[in-house]
Image (cartoon, rainbow, N blue to C red):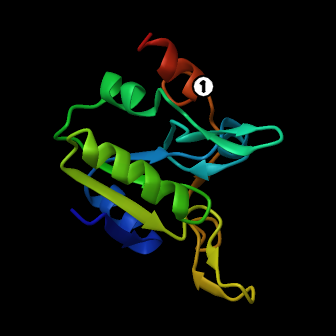
Amino acid sequence: MAIKQISVQEAHDLLEKEPDRVYIDVRTVREFAAGHPKGGINIPVAFPDPGRGMMMNEEFVKVVEGHFAKEKKIIVGCQAGPRADAAARLLQEAGYQDVSSMQGGFGGMRDPFGQVIAPGWASLGFPVSDENGEGVSYESLAAKVK
């Protein structure tokens, strides 16, 4: 099944219209803490691995399952789009039925020449938060699943 791709504008509109829909920011803890879509929670799909780039978060699906039923409507987003696609695929494979990948992410997607091909959440002026506490931070979400 193909990953449902939505624009940042569509994600914003869905989150406004459907308060029960959840936004999972799959960026690193550090990226999330620096600013994220207001109301989002952080469950990284990968972690920085010095010398090797990024390493998959083996607990990603387990942490999502610990907080959300398979019927939950979920939007996943990252910095530009590729990590969100990977996260959406993992969630679909785990049985989640309504998962969308936000193209453009928080920072926007650019082509090889630096031209913006999908604007990001921040550049569109949508609400941003740096809240990273209980129920929002990866540390607090993962601790409740172990």
The N terminus sits in image quarter: bottom left
- The total number of labels drawn is 1
From the viewer's side, name the closer residue of 6 and 134.
Answer: 6
Q: Secondary structure at mark 1?
A: loop
Q: Residue furthest front?
A: 52
From the viewer's perspective, is 1 left or right of 122? left
Q: Which residue appears at 35% of the width and 69% of the height? A: 5
Indicate the position of residue 107 as horizontal and vertical percent values.
Answer: 65, 65
Q: Which residue appears at 82% of the width and 38% of the height? A: 50
Establish if 60 lies above or below 77.
Answer: above
Establish if 118 lies above or below 50.
Answer: below
Residue 49 makes an appearance in the image = yes
From the viewer's perspective, is 84 left or right of 79? left
Kind of residue sitting beneath label 1? Gly
How many C-alpha atoms fall within 10 Å of the one at disc 1: few (<14), some, or many (≥20)?
few
Question: Which quadrant of the structure image shows residue 138?
Answer: top right
Indicate the position of residue 57 as horizontal and vertical percent values.
Answer: 54, 33
Q: Which residue appears at 59% of the width and 41% of the height? A: 46
From the viewer's side, name the closer residue of 20 and 75.
Answer: 75
From the viewer's perspective, is 108 left or right of 135? right
Indicate the position of residue 40 as horizontal and vertical percent values.
Answer: 49, 44
Q: Which residue appears at 31% of the width and 62% of the height? A: 14
Residue 20 makes an appearance in the image = no
Residue tagged 1: 133
Indicate the position of residue 136 as horizontal and vertical percent values.
Answer: 52, 31
Establish if 90 lies above or below 68.
Answer: below
